[in-house]
Image: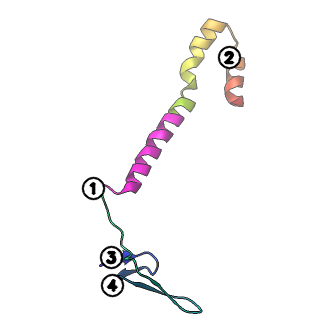
Amino acid sequence: MGYCPLTSKHCTSDKVEIMSKDSKIFFSRPVRIHRTGLVFWGWYVVFSSFIALTLIYGARYSFGVFVKPMFAEYDWPMTVIFLAASIN
């Protein structure tokens, strides 16, 4: 017994019947979803998206850490440094 995504019901046979306007369509292949691992593959997508967004936002919002060293090394005014940050 498997879940049929086409009819949103549980399938008990090897054939899935779908009603169309003109005729009935039969699929001879069993429609079943097999899980091959312990963890559903969608959780890998969620985890990798979380890691990517964490790295991206961490790099984007860490500009404040570099302001004082840029100010000390280049002798640029703070307004120029923050103007460059705001344009980014």
Query: Residue at 67% across / 7% down in the picture?
Result: 75
Mark closest to the chain's N terminus, 2 or 4: 4
Disc 4 designates what residue? 13
Q: Which label belongs to residue 78?
A: 2
Q: How far apart are marks 3 and 2 (CA)?
A: 64 Å
At x 68%, y 23%, the residue is 82
Crowding at dot 2, Cα within 10 Å, few <14 / some 14-19 / many 20+, comes out as few
Residue tagged 1: 38
* Quadrant occupied by the N terminus: bottom left
- Rendered position, 32 above or below 17: above
Q: Nearer the viewer, mark 3 or mark 2?
A: 3
Query: In the image, what residue type sits under mark 3?
Result: Gly
Residue at the disc numbered 3: 2
Residue 61 visible, this orientation: no
Report the Cα–Cα distance between label 2 and label 1: 53 Å
Between the residue at mark 2 and the residue at mark 4, the CA separation in whole angstroms equals 72 Å
Q: Comparing marks 2 and 4, which lies closer to the viewer?
A: 4
The residue under the point 35% across, 81% down is: 10
Q: Earlier in the sequence, mark 1 or mark 4?
A: 4
For image coordinates 57% across by 23% down, the residue present is 64
Magenta region: 37-57
Residue 72 pos. (x, y %) = 60, 7
- Say if residue 52 shows up in the picture: yes
